[in-house]
Image (spheres, rainbow, N blue to C red):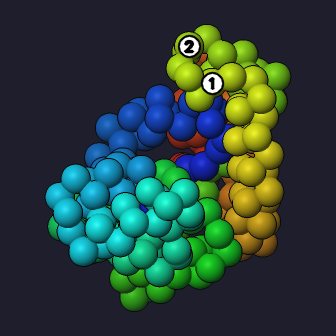
Amino acid sequence: MRILIFGPPGAGKGTQAQFISKRYNIPHISTGDIFRENIRNNTPLGIEAKRYSEAGELVPDMVTNAMVRERLLQEDTADGFLLDGFPRTPAQADALEHMLPEGTKLNTVLNMIVTEDEIISRLGKRGRSDDEESTIRKRLRIYRDTTKPIAEYYRAKGILTDIQGIGTIEDITRCIIEAIEKHK
């Protein structure tokens, strides 16, 4: 199974990714984790990513794509993966298509839908410094602007499923499993 999951901050992606990864015995691959690992290990890609990050700039697609490609080539992804946080741009979505082994494709893309008010409520309860309401609203606006084209890209391919991220964790997990099973 090759699955993508995306949604705004606070949508419950991490919680659901744990269940999906365990149920389907596939690694949960977070681009945030990939970045941190490359930076911590001072890899050539990590050094380049750190340079952009420290300058307050977005890491270019070329660097991000190379990090993801390296991770997807590791042995534990042979039977599939759950990719979280990638792709974020149409160019990254195109690059991902070329990273997959010949004859394989993404099975499904899960789009976690949660209202802005619910996200503000959830993130506000965490008490982190970057969880001020104005900061959350800015992050949500950026997310909406960058993600909408990606959602439409996968919707046009017929593999996107919108998942309502409000309800019990168990109910949301059940909806996700149904979506995955439908696209096996």
Label 1, secondary structure: give it.
helix
- The single residue placed furthest to the front in the displayed view is 55
- Residue at 24% across, 74% down: 44
Near-viewer residue (159 or 46): 46
- Look at mark 1 in the image and give the residue it sits on: 131
- Residue at 46% across, 58% down: 53
Question: On the picture, is 72 further left or further right than 5?
Answer: left
Q: Is residue 155 above or below residue 37?
A: below
At label 2, the amino acid type is Gly
Near-viewer residue (171 or 85): 85
- Look at mark 2 in the image and give the residue it sits on: 127
Picture quadrant where residue 1 is located: bottom left
Label 2, secondary structure: give it.
loop
Cα separation between marks 2 and 1: 7 Å
* Residue 178: mark in rendering: none
- Mark 1, residues whose alpha carbon is within 10 Å: few (<14), some, or many (≥20)? some
Q: Position of residue 143 (x, y in %)?
A: 71, 50
Q: Is residue 142 above or below residue 1?
A: above
Determine whether label 2 and label 1 are within 8 Å by CB: yes
Let me know if residue 21 appears in the view. Answer: yes
